[in-house]
Image (spheres, coloured by chain):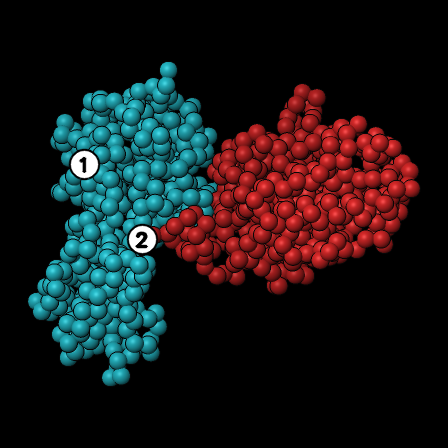
Chain colours: A cyan, B red
Amino acid sequence: MTLDETYSKLLVKTDAKLALIVLDGLGDIATREQGYLTPLEAARTPNLDALSKDSAQGRMIPVAPGITPGSGPGHLALFGYDPLEFEVGRGVIEALGLGLELKGGDVAVRGNFCSLDAGGKVSDRRAGRIPTEKCEELCAILSRGLTAVGDTQVIIQPGKEHRFVVIFRGPGLEGPLSDTDPGREGQPIAEAKPENPKSVKQKKAATVIAEFYKKALPLLAKQHPANAFLLRGIAHQPHIPTFEERYGLRPAALAVYPMYKGLSQLVGMTKVEGPQTIAEQFRKYLDLHDQHDFFFIHYKYTDKYGEDGNFGAKVKAIEDFDAALPILMQKKPDVIAITGDHSTPCAIKGHSWHPQPVLLHSAYSGWDKLDRFTETGANLGSLGIFEAKYLIRLMQANAKMFAKFGA
Amino acid sequence: MTLDETYSKLLVKTDAKLALIVLDGLGDIATREQGYLTPLEAARTPNLDALSKDSAQGRMIPVAPGITPGSGPGHLALFGYDPLEFEVGRGVIEALGLGLELKGGDVAVRGNFCSLDAGGKVSDRRAGRIPTEKCEELCAILSRGLTAVGDTQVIIQPGKEHRFVVIFRGPGLEGPLSDTDPGREGQPIAEAKPENPKSVKQKKAATVIAEFYKKALPLLAKQHPANAFLLRGIAHQPHIPTFEERYGLRPAALAVYPMYKGLSQLVGMTKVEGPQTIAEQFRKYLDLHDQHDFFFIHYKYTDKYGEDGNFGAKVKAIEDFDAALPILMQKKPDVIAITGDHSTPCAIKGHSWHPQPVLLHSAYSGWDKLDRFTETGANLGSLGIFEAKYLIRLMQANAKMFAKFGA
């Protein structure tokens, strides 16, 4: 019996409510420039401090030692899906980020508008970074002129500046294919080729994309400077067992940014629209408390200010979160996990590989004698350093959702 | 995609310099007899203390929980090769220890001179531990009389007392074979048999060794007390992907003892001859700084005095190392890891299974709020307790050598 089968076999139905609260990019490092404090250490967090008093702590490796995850693998791991097993392509992530809803088997692709010279060579891979309005205009032209290729539906959605997304929806399609972006100017548009030449579905996707180019390029021929486009990250929506199948829990996703709504939908969570602030997200949790067993609550700003390298703003984002926390506690979930999907240290101005701190609270978590929730404290916690993919199993254990294994 | 394939795919070329500094057998335990201090805790180490201030710490499991590694598996693990996957036979380790250079496919064997009685039974498995000079004389007799068996070249090198090494170099050979040492007196010399009876290469090696005995025993017949020999640890040089293939780094090995030079050559490091002290090794690093990306610097004396159970000498060896450290810092590597290949506790007088402490320093390591580098401190560090085979991946992450995984 595999470990996953074992968990499934031991599963017991309970009325417990579980909340996974993700402060995106929460983890940080203590550097000389920051007075050897992390944002969590520098922030005033009376409510998190109070919660720490009855919680276990530890740190989580998002994917594997030394690997810096994007948001996709970071969240898949948190949701308990091994990100090395379930790979989500760049096109899919971009589509989710634009709020597009994907269906199983959809092939999603990132597009860049570009400039072609008279000889058919790419003269500017970003068409001079055309304004977003121009991109919207070009996407409208394509959408009007081209809604299908054979039995495959084509959905086009503009992004920022020269960027857009194409979804190919039809029977028998699969990624990944190679990019049509030649990678540098002075080369013609490349052919999208199957990564696995034996895959019939990838071959069909390649044919569909070649046909798409044939129909689309004439529609743009008179445009300037964006008279063509390059496709990258050609990937299909992976088939992932749903969260409910995996855990026996009815999950709701309370996220503000499209990317995280999309990632939660990949695993079949119910997307909740409306709330725009963490206080509103917590209030929505109160409203939905009886309708779901599991709540994924996503807070973006810790990552955003980490990416900016703005230590003060990351501290403030943690304090804002802390100030809203009492709303959640009005109907305290039986199990609360507070963590990040990865670290985004201010000193790095980007995602990193450093294990993120995690706080796990329940009637059965015990207290690790730590008065605050910080990276340095979490190093000493009873959870140790573990792979993020085990977090929900630990939450389930704390919800008494597993029977004893063996006698 | 496997984890190793993932690391390879994410690899980015940088100008970073990485230094892996191994204080052999560094780890220790705190016992009553030692005043509950480890040598690292008892030593005066101002330079290591200063470095700790901007470093992460943790402990590493050399092979697996409870397993005490020899120098071979200990170093292979440090170099990032799973020692359970890449087994290096005892004969190969002995050959490396004597400074012999092995080629791919060589079969290396430990030999012991022994005494045979008139009935052909082994009467002394070590021939009364003949002096080293006698061993050299016997090896010279064998080398003069026997340079090849069929198409297989034979290379014989004396060791200490009754010990020597034989290399069989020729086409189509492979280990492992069973020992010819019967294990106790009163038995005849055993036959070397293939471990895998289906292996054509092992069968050929067995034939070569049987033939070797037929030619060699008459050369020793009149010697006393060593008129024969036993062969053990019959193994071939394993095919190991080179360090440069695996990591995209150009490595140099700065070791004093032949064994560690040999182990670094197993993975294709450039062996640097000359330096005899840690100060000279660090000065050679300064000289070679621009010619390599990765420096393996090996310091033997912590292990040596641990093996002797000499606490004071192990403390002194650490202090000597510390005193030389400023030479390295004249051209500070971007990433520094300081650790052991295993623990050699004074109380055990030998290698042990205890996880060795590791200090990891870079601009992105952060500080774990630990003022010194010790076993007890390392227990509290952000690196946690991890398998030694991940160390170089963490060093590469700290050198920003990995692109983000997924979007």
Q: Residues within 10 Å of mark 2 (few under 14, many from 20)?
A: some
Residue farthest toward the top in the current orientation of the protein: A407
Instruction: State whether residue B66 appears in this view.
Output: yes
Residue designated by label 2 = B407
Residue farthest toward the front in the current orientation of the protein: B119
| Foreground residue among A226 and B73 | B73
Give the chain of mark 1. A
Horizontal side of residue B58 vs B22, given as left or right: left
| Foreground residue among A78 and A285 | A78
Q: Is residue B136 above or below residue B186?
A: below
Give the chain of mark 2. B
Residue B130 percent across, percent down from the top left: 87, 37
Give amino acid for label 1.
Ala
| Foreground residue among B269 and A125 | B269
Q: Residue at left 22%, top 38%? A: A242
Q: Residues within 10 Å of mark 1 (few under 14, many from 20)?
A: many
Q: Residue at left 91%, top 38%? A: B224
Residue A189's mark?
none
Q: Secondary structure at mark 2?
A: loop
Q: Secondary structure at mark 1?
A: strand
Residue A252's mark?
1
Instruction: State whether residue B402 appears in this view.
Output: no
Quarter of the image with the C terminus of chain A is: top left
Q: Residue at left 25%, top 68%? A: A230
Residue farthest toward the bottom in the current orientation of the protein: A118
